[in-house]
Amino acid sequence: MNNLNKIMSGLVVAFVVVSLSAFTVDQRQAAMIFQLGEIVDVKTEPGLYFKMPFLQNVRFFDARILTMDSQEPERFITSEKKNVLVDSFVKWRIVDVKKYYVSVGGDEMRAKQRLFQTVNDSLRAEFGKRTVHDVVSGQRDQIMEILRQKADQDARKIGVQVLDVRLKRVDLPQEVSESVYQRMEAERKRVANELRSTGAGEAEKIRADADRQREVILAEAYREAQRTKGEGDAKATALYSEAYSANPEFYAFYRSLEAYRQTFRNKSDVMVLDPSSEFFKYLKSPGK
């Protein structure tokens, strides 16, 4: 009976010692072992570990990727002296547990305050180099990468790695928005006027070219008509000359008839002529 009690007592003591000595670290954690207030070891790999009971104690730290989200949009000034409101967040994690503990006492809140100050200082510096257009749309990705690099460089001093810095929202205060919209509208009007002016110039050029071509075509047509008319007149003259040579008396009679027809075409015309005029030669004696 005494032996059984001793065995049972030994098992109980062993269980207590093991329970006070053993601890586990999972993949989401890192552990730091202290002995009399001094850091003696750091465990970052998952597994079962042991410590000296009563003499040593363990403190666990979150090794997951953490998020620091700004509570309220922060106001920054651009190179144009315009205010912008920025809402951002940071992804970070502990990579050096010992440095993290020594720097901020292992206090996550203090670490976030340090990161917040670093990111804000970087934002202020980067936005001060850029215009409103750059920070709103033009260079947003570039700004975020620069912020991440600067924040990570400072965060390494406290055992933290900055994985990402994101600008969730970049807005303009109401008074700045109105100014920007007015400038954008003026720019659109300027471009529209420039396009209209260019279009009007092109249209005028096309019209001038069309007028020039029309004048050339008309001149060519007139010249061709005059040439054809000249050829016709020449042929008519040749025919008249040939007819006159063949029968001068008949040709004179024919020309007189043409003259009568043209002269007496309008019945209302009144003419005063000498009856003995050569004009009435064939009217007086058509057979001669």
Image (cartoon, helix red, strand yellow):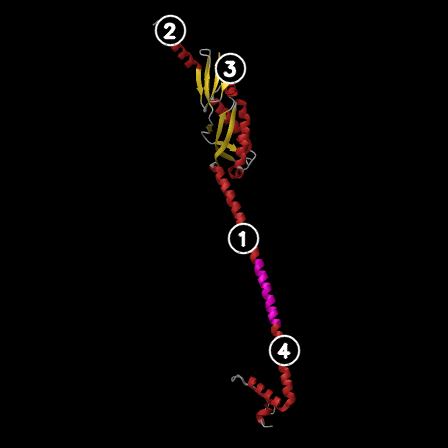
**In the rendered image, which residue does mark 2 sit on?**
6
Describe the element under mark 4 as helix, strand or loop: helix
Dot 1 falls on a residue whose secondary structure is: helix
The Cα atoms of the two marked residues, 4 and 3, are separated by 123 Å
- For this rendering, which residue is in front, 186 or 2? 2
Q: Along the line of sight, which residue is nearer the eye, 176 or 192? A: 192
Mark toward the start of the polypeptide (2 vs 3): 2
Relative side of 174 to 207, left or right: left
Between label 4 and label 1, give the one nearer the viewer. Answer: 4
Q: Position of residue 256 (x, y in %)?
A: 59, 88
Label 2 vs 1, first from the N-terminus: 2
Q: Earlier in the sequence, mark 4 or mark 1?
A: 1
From the image, state whether disc 3 or disc 1 is nearer to you: 3
Eye-nearest disc, 2 or 3: 2
Distance from Cα at disc 4 to Cα at disc 1? 52 Å
Q: Write the start and end of the magenta stretch as one range.
A: 204-223
| Mark 2 residue type | Lys
- Mark 3 residue crowding within 10 angstroms, few (<14) / some (14–19) / many (20+): few
Which numbered disc flags the more N-terminal residue, 4 or 2? 2
Q: Amino acid at mark 1?
A: Arg
